Amino acid sequence: MLDKNAHVRASNLSVNFGSVDVLNGLNLDIQKGEFLVLLGSSGCGKSTLLNTFAGLQEATSGQIWIDGRNVTWEEPKDRGIAMVFQSYALYPKMTVRGNLSFALKMNGTPRREITKLVEDAARILQIGHLLDRRPSELSGGQRQRVAIGRALVRHVDVFLFDEPLSNLDAKLRAELRVELKRLHRELGATMIYVTHDQVEALTLADRIAAMKDGVIQQLACPDEIYNRPANRFVAQFIGLPSMNFFKGKLTRKDDKPIFSSSELTLSLEDYEAETSLEEGQEVELGIRPEHILLLKDPSGIASGMLGTIDLVEMLGSEQIVWVVAENSRFCMRVPPDEKLRHGERVAVQFRTDNLNLFSMQHGMRL
């Protein structure tokens, strides 16, 4: 049944390349004004889904709806969307003004309206002082702003972004992330954004669709994706460094659930389970690096273990410390002023209010 509140919708969508199923019966509702990020590694189907929304890729079966209208077989120009690609694809002989106005001229838009649309886009993207320059005279970040502006002048309600920041260096990516967030707030338009970069996803998205093998593994807000991943794949994929995992079994003590392994015993009394915790069940315990605490005094260690420092990564604002224990290797975040060295014995404490349990059988969160 069609969700009347959805602005963009994929209904039972399948895309096949010969015998290869890239998308198989995918359903996705995107609300008006939402910033949705399609996140996944190469080959997961995220760009194929975006191209199918745009009309650049034909659906094998299923339907695409935009603003309550079935656009499955409509041409891209008739769908009311604008797309920004990874490549800037600017006309090198034209000025910035010419690049921004070219499509409008081809559509027969009146000159006065073109001038207003170009000036409005330049103001929003802060490129007004660049209008008379050519692409060769611009930095990478400025070129990408022009590419975004070329989509912006069309005054559509749906913007599609296919890894637009991938060609930029780290500093420019961070700057343009802020610009995109501000742009979304100012326009209030629906934006669908494809990336493999989890930092982009977590900072930009209202909701993230984490994808693997053409299937949406979890669709949720960044906070839920990060803190309550639906399965082990999402838990491992999101977070830098990744979540730590420890294999063990579920036991009980005084009728309270316990995680138990050869080197670690943790109370699960505060754990908010999605399903029942069955005694004897084999599980993996997941915990983020920031939820493992370095103990000053190892005496009386409770919810933790002893280990040896294997590696220290200084990142300026923090240190990532890798620790080797009896049967495991894990990392934790430590303040930059802690003096730690390779080979040092340390005691660590696990925060039991920030744990995740995953079934060893099917990988889903328990």
Image (cartoon, helix red, strand yellow):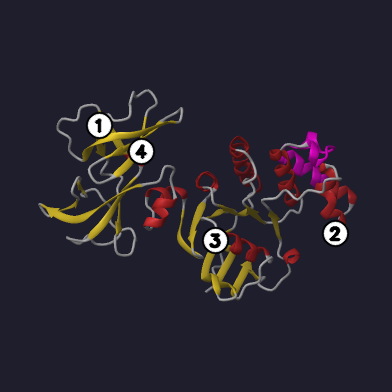
Q: Which residue is mark 3?
A: 43
Q: Amino acid at mark 1?
A: Val
CA gap, disc 2 and disc 4: 54 Å
Residue 6 lies left or right of residue 274; in this view the side is: right
Q: In the image, which is nearer the foreground, mark 3 or mark 4? A: 3
* Amino acid type, callout 4: Glu
Sooner in the amino-acid sequence: mark 3 or mark 1? 3
Q: Secondary structure at mark 1?
A: strand
Magenta-tinted stretch: 116-137
Q: Would you say the residues marked 4 and 1 are in contact, meaning their CB atoms lie under 8 Å apart?
A: no
Q: Which residue is mark 1?
A: 346
Magenta span dominant secondary structure: helix
Q: Residues within 10 Å of mark 3 (few under 14, many from 20)?
A: few
Judged by depth in the image, the label closer to the viewer, 2 or 1, is 1
Please determine whether, in this image, residue 53 is positioned above or below residue 131. below
Q: Earlier in the sequence, mark 3 or mark 4?
A: 3
Mark pair 3, 4: CA separation: 31 Å
Report which residue position mark 2 lands on: 107
- Label 3, label 1: how many angstroms apart (C-alpha)? 41 Å
Residue at left offset 43%, top offset 47%: 223
The mark lying in front, picked from 2 and 4, is 4
Give the alpha-carbon distance from disc 4 to disc 1, as whole Å.
16 Å
Q: Nearer the viewer, mark 4 or mark 1?
A: 1
Q: Is residue 337 left or right of residue 59?
A: left
Looking at the rendered structure, the kind of residue marked 3 is Gly
**Disc 2 to disc 3, C-alpha distance:** 36 Å
Q: From this viewpoint, is residue 145 visible? A: yes
Label 4: which residue? 290
Helix, strand or loop at disc 3? Answer: loop
